[in-house]
Image (cartoon, helix red, strand yellow):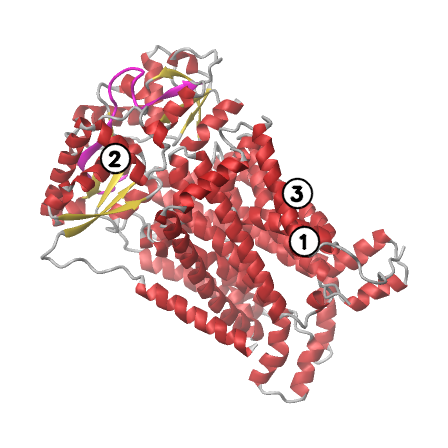
Amino acid sequence: MLWRVVLPLVLPVVLVAAWWAATADSTDFFWPPLSDILGTFPDTWFSGRFTADVLPSLVRLGAGYLLALVLGVGLGVAIGSSRPLRALLEPVLEFFRAIPAPVLVPILMLFAGIGNGMKVLVIISGCLWPVLLNTVEGVRGLDEVLRDTARCYRMRRGSRLVHLVLRGASPQIAAGARQALSIGIILMVISEMFAASNGVGFTIIQFQRSFSIPQMWSGIILLGLIGIALSAAFQAVESWALRWYTGLRRSQREGQR
Amino acid sequence: MTAAAPLGRRRSLPAWALGLAGLAALMAVVEIAPRAGLVNERFLPPFSRMISSLADQAGTSGFWGALLETLRGWALGLAIAMAAGVALGLVIGAVPLLRSATAGAIEFLRPIPSVALIPLAVLLYGTQMRATLLLVVYASFWQVLVQVLYGVRDVDPVARETARSYRFRPLTRVRTVLWPTALPYVMTGFRLGAAVALILEITGELVIGSPGLGRQIAVAQTSGAVAAMYALVIVVGVMGVAVNTAARATERRVLRWHPSVRGEVPA
Amino acid sequence: MTRLRAALAAASVLLLAACGSGQGSSDASDKGPTSVKVDVIPIIDVAPVYLGNQKGFFAEQQLKLQMVTAQGGAAIVPAVVSGQVDFGFSNYTSLIIARSKGLPLKVVAPGAASTGKQRKDFGGVVVKANSPIKTAKDLVGKRVAVNTLNNINDTTVRASIRAAGGDATNVKFTELAFPDMLAALDKGNVDAVQVVEPFLTTGQKNGGRLVASNYVDTAPDLTIAAYFTSQKTASAKPELVKRFTAAMQKSLQYAQAHPDEVRKVLGTYTKIDPSLTGSLILPAYPAQVNAASVQTLADLAVKDGLIKKAPDVQDLLP
């Protein structure tokens, strides 16, 4: 039991220790010792910056991500179920998806201004794609037998949507939502490179520009930690929502244990 | 309300025609909106002006050189990411011990946004192609790896046990059970990885300044050449569409036995 | 399936071969000219380097220039310090901040300077035609966009406000890239923008009004930017640095004397509209560093809280 808890931590601990050892006597300006970086953590992030920068960033990320989920699943179900609609929209969607965020943001600024709304829009514009495309895949790949069964039982549109389509596609949707989360964090940083006045990404960029390198690295580590925390939260939600799926697989596996 | 299967042939437009129609509608909007004053045409020029700038640029060797640089970086990064992602994903996914051991490290490294690596890439490789390559490989690798891990996890236990009871050799088991289940996920990973690789390649060129279309966009921006910038953005977007189309065609060919593809074939 | 696998394998082999052949070529032999990597931002400030290279001033000094472009000083300074490139280009405030943090940099030659003429400089603060802002003093309490926060542009704008008699601490600075500023001004997202060419001329042509020449207000003949190297290169290769400096000074003098050729060379490394290059205001290209203006920038950096203590300016300059 203890082994199961300890084993996942072994590799990260080894990597961190290696980093510490490799930079311990470093005099290179851009690779300060890990001890210095960790030393600046309290002053940099926990004396006021948390509420002033980290929280606004997370709030924007949360708003953008949730809106992208809703939009992505909604559009994905519609597009996945209708072949003509998919054929009509796919090239246009792929076109916009290929435009990188740093190029898209100035164009978005023309329409959405330079405030918080623009930043949330940037996050949505990036998070939408994995959710949308994975939902389309999930809807397309529904088990034929299930689909026909639902038809035989004359299930109404609404309950077919919830029980057949959404539930059936949810493993794929979950995969898409997972990717959207990492993209969301990236876009949270990128959106704060334009016309920003607060935020984690903004602060890291300012540190980089003013050559406050230990603080910059501490910001990068903080981003990693935020990512890990959000990822863990996501996994908790995913395992709850998909418990029917994991239960199904596990019961099939358990038969042979 | 059940929908009966359609009798006889349904006369709908072929997929490519609908796709073109969608693109045409977009072009019309971009042509009309600046001309109608909905948006200032100094900042969003009409589509025709973007195209004429593109035609001018297509006549220069600098444009084609940049295009080739971008393609080279993209292809190389994607190839490395696919090879590493599939190999590591299959190995880690199939061995439960490895999966638990690396789960922590993967969860730790994966959420680090690739933009956070930009200072690192610049420190290691300056502003040359390898700096952007680092970003591209890093970002697409995770896309592929995650998909492959999902795929391995999704193996039908019955099929797996059947293969074991028939005493298939491990390699045969991989070929007949593991690989077909994982393959749709691998193709999804390939498609997503290809798209992400292109985005990171352009982003790297834009932000770091390595040679390619992204750098041309940055030069156009700092020169205030708005139509030229949009022309290049169109090229990048078209590349994205081309990449997706090629990936889907590959996917269809490789997965012609899978329900999602078979369901599409008209009766 | 096997065919596909074979095709993929072949493709990856080809790609790896292409990658291998693209490896950086080794340095030229000692007999020929020395290869020198210069990292610049592709803006009008660095025209003298391109012009001088075209005219053969660098070849005269047995130097083969390899131009590398970056998007900002934040990328150039690490490249220079780590030895990836030999020389870089950056504005003085960035260099001062870097030096105050202990980065071992050394200026070798000036890059660009203000023309020193009010309303005829290559940078300035622009507002919309119908804006109530008439002088730098009216900027107090307003939103002003600069391309980098806590750097030379907001520092010099504050100096402008002080020179006009206003309270410089009460200005809302926002960071926006130069290409995005005019659109934001047009939409009313900001009240004023500090821009440089070619956006200065474009902005004024499309109805904008110039209210302040911030570089002129800060100091007479303010040097804006310079070419620099790392102290390691300066002490390990003093001959190379001397040759580069000589070639740079000749290029700068030539550029200052031949503005028409400068306008022509802009077309080779920027995408500035050819119809616009004729009406742009070019910066001054001094051949010698103006030490007093660098000291002014250092003092302003301390005053505006960018750094705690001014570095020894003499140590930074050649």
According to the image, label 3 marks what residue? A67
Q: Secondary structure at mark 2?
A: helix
Q: What type is the residue that disc 3 sits on? A: Leu
Label 2: few (<14), some or many (≥20) within 10 Å? many
**Image-based side of A57 in relation to A168, left or right:** left
- Residue at the location (63% across, 66% down)? B252
| Residue at 74% from the left image edge and 50% from the top image edge | A78
- In this picture, is C125 found above or below B262? above
Residue B38 position by quadrant: top right
Q: Same chain for marks 1 and 2? A: no
Q: Is residue B207 visible?
A: no
The quadrant the N terminus of chain A occupies is: bottom right
Badge 2 amino acid = Ala
Residue to which mark 2 is pinned? C47
Disc 1/disc 3 C-alpha distance (Å): 24 Å
Boundaries of the magenta span: C100-127
The chain that hosts pointer 2 is C
Residue C159 is inside the magenta segment: no
Cα separation, mark 3 vs mark 2, equals 47 Å
Residue A164 vertical placement versus C135 (above, below): below
